[in-house]
Image (cartoon, grey):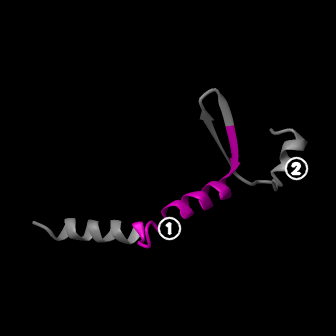
Amino acid sequence: MLPAPFRKALDLSVGEHLVVRLEADHLVIEKSAAVERRVHQRFRKADGRSLADELIEERRREAASP
């Protein structure tokens, strides 16, 4: 359970999920939605290309080769 001031600062709703990770010697607590947004932004487009599309195409080529 997080103290009320922390819950208020994070604008947490009942049942909202958090991600807790260890970085060096301290804990980082984030809303899971914030982590998801950051990951999506990171992998959405790189240099104007979709990394997901590239991965799918790579897997298709691998599956097609004997």
Q: Which mark is residue 53?
A: none
Residue 22 lies in what quarter of the image?
A: top right
Q: Is residue 6 left or right of residue 27?
A: right
Q: Position of residue 5 (x, y in %)?
A: 90, 43
Q: Is residue 28 above or below residue 51?
A: above
User: What is the crowding at mark 1: few (fewer than 14 residues within 10 Å), some, or many (at least 20)?
Assistant: some
Q: Are marks 1 and 2 in contact (CB under 8 Å)?
A: no
Q: Position of residue 62 (x, y in %)?
A: 20, 65
Q: Which residue is mark 1?
A: 44
User: Mark 1 vs mark 2: which is more N-terminal?
Assistant: 2
Distance of label 1 from label 2 (alpha carbons): 31 Å
Identify residue type, mark 2: Lys
Q: Quadrant of the C terminus?
A: bottom left
SS at mark 2 in the image: helix
Look at discs 1 and 2 and give the one toward the viewer: 1
Extreme residue in the front direction = 47
Extreme residue in the left direction = 66
Q: Is residue 11 above or below residue 24?
A: below
Mark count: 2
Asked if the magenta segment contains residue 32, the reply would be yes
Q: Is residue 49 left or right of residue 8?
A: left
Asked if the magenta segment contains residue 53, the reply would be no
Q: Nearer the viewer, residue 33 or 51?
A: 51
- Residue drawn at x 88%, y 50% is 8
- Residue drawn at x 87%, y 38% is 3
Q: Position of residue 42 (x, y in %)?
A: 52, 60
Q: Which residues are magenta?
A: 28-51
SS at mark 1 in the image: helix
Q: Which mark is residue 8?
A: 2
- Residue drawn at x 67%, y 34% is 27
Q: Is residue 50 left or right of residue 27?
A: left
Identify residue type, mark 1: Arg
